[in-house]
Image: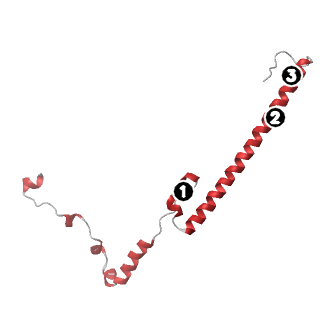
Amino acid sequence: MDEELYNLPSPSNEEQYVHTSSTLSASESDNPAKTAGVQEHMLDKKKSKRKIRYVGDISSEDFSTPKKAKRNFRNLKSALDSEKKKRRGLQTTVTTLRRRIKTLSSLLKLLRSKHYTSGSSKIC
């Protein structure tokens, strides 16, 4: 709006952007092989690896090549095996604790029937 008021020309798109070729120093512009190597180096930079922590983090892209498929299948299998071991251990713990509760409640019932305990103790 001010440009119309003062009859100033509007900036063109070329003036708004800084060209990378104009920012090179004299020594860099003299050696085109060096600048090409820098550009290739920028393109060769690898992306940071995405960390797969859970089974749900694996996508179909992770099985795109045989090498990736083998590695991810091995990781998936080991994760499932460790989960199975944890589950089995927890089931054993639950079974042991239930057995202990049953034994203690039957012992309490026996002691109560023989009047060795006070009336305030409860049976679970």
The quadrant of the picture occupied by the C terminus is: top right
Amino acid carrying mark 1 in the image? Ile
Residue 23 falls in image quadrant = bottom left
**Does dot 3 land on a helix, a strand or a loop?**
helix
Residue 67 falls in image quadrant = bottom right
- Spatial CA span between label 2 and label 3: 15 Å
> With 50 as the anchor, is 5 left or right in this view?
left
Nearer the observer, 95 or 42: 95
CA neighbours of label 1 inside 10 A, class few (<14), some (14 to 19), many (20+): some
> With 98 as the anchor, is 64 left or right in this view?
left
Residue 24 falls in image quadrant = bottom left
> With 95 as the anchor, is 79 left or right in this view?
left
Nearer the observer, 100 or 66: 66
Amino acid carrying mark 3 in the image? Lys
Amino acid carrying mark 2 in the image? Arg
The residue under the point 31% across, 78% down is 25
Q: Residue furthest top?
A: 119
CA neighbours of label 2 inside 10 A, class few (<14), some (14 to 19), many (20+): few
Image position, residue 72 (x, y; %): 59, 61
Query: Where does label 1 land, which residue?
Result: 58
Q: Which labelled disc corresponds to residue 99?
A: 2
Nearer the observer, 91 or 29: 91
Residue 54 visible in the shown view: no
Image position, residue 47 (x, y; %): 47, 65
Query: Where does label 3 land, which residue?
Result: 109
| Contact (Cβ within 8 Å) of mark 1 with mark 3 | no
Q: Earlier in the sequence, mark 2 or mark 1?
A: 1
The residue under the point 40% across, 79% down is 37
Image position, residue 96 (x, y; %): 80, 38
**Does dot 2 land on a helix, a strand or a loop?**
helix
Residue 70 visible in the shown view: yes
Image position, residue 31 (x, y; %): 34, 84
